[in-house]
Amino acid sequence: MILASQSPRRIEILQLAGFDPDVRPQDVDETPLSGESPVELVERLSRRKALACAVDAPADEVIIAADTIVWMGDEELGKPADADDARRMLGLLSGKTHHVSTGVCIVRGERERSFVETTDVTFFDLTDEEIDAYVATGDPLDKAGAYGYQSKGCTLVRRIEGDFFNVVGLPIGRLVRELDAWEDR
């Protein structure tokens, strides 16, 4: 299995499920297309990454690519530009429910299969002091939506509805079922 991502969280999730992926990250343009929804974006990006990886991969190798986005309403919340942007994002998420969508694409030879998993995440009401303290840890600065559910950001979350591992970056339960169904064909 080849993982077309260098995300330490995705690698860890695959290893937790018993896989030992060969990691081959792909660099693709991640600019959203005009009018593209967050769900369409992550599906398109995961497909582009998988197909880019497939160019140099043996035809019998299974390639997994994923892309995750945090979004609320019409706003996509990528990685914050700086601490002020992280504060803005966390303020926006405070006391509200947002969505985490992961697009996954599986490629093997000429065959491909893709899906998107979405999980709803609700934050506690956060004070300015709580937001400042969390931003000061540095944890939100390299995370979409300015928080890491698998790290200190877990204290911000009141509830999730859906797949925990999807919020971390890879809906492993669904991925395994998709792989099994694909192999049965």
Image (cartoon, rainbow, N blue to C red):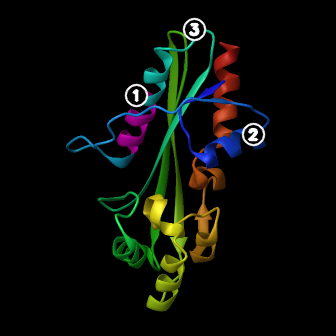
Quadrant hosting residue 137: bottom right
Mark sitting earlier along the chain (1/3):
1
Kind of residue sitting beneath label 2: Gln
Residue 45: in magenta span: yes
Name the side, left or right, on which 12 lies relative to 86: right
Residue carrying label 2 = 15
Which label belongs to residue 59? 3
Quadrant location of the C terminus in the rendered image: top right
Quadrant hosting residue 52: top left
User: Which residue is painted at 44% across and 63% down in the image?
Assistant: 145
User: Which residue is painted at 54% across and 68% down in the image?
Assistant: 139
Which label belongs to residue 48? 1
Residue 145: in magenta span: no
Q: Nearer the viewer, residue 29 or 32?
A: 29
Disc 1 to disc 3: CB gap under 8 Å: no
Which label belongs to residue 111? none
Q: CA distance from mark 1 to mark 3?
A: 17 Å
Secondary element under disc 2, as helix, strand or loop, is: helix
Mark sitting earlier along the chain (1/2):
2
Kind of residue sitting beneath label 3: Ala
Secondary element under disc 1, as helix, strand or loop, is: helix
- Disc 3 crowd, CA 10 A, few/some/many (<14, 14-19, 20+): some
Q: Position of residue 29 (x, y in %)?
A: 32, 36
Q: Up-down: is 101 above or below 28?
A: below
Name the side, left or right, on which 103 lies relative to 10: left
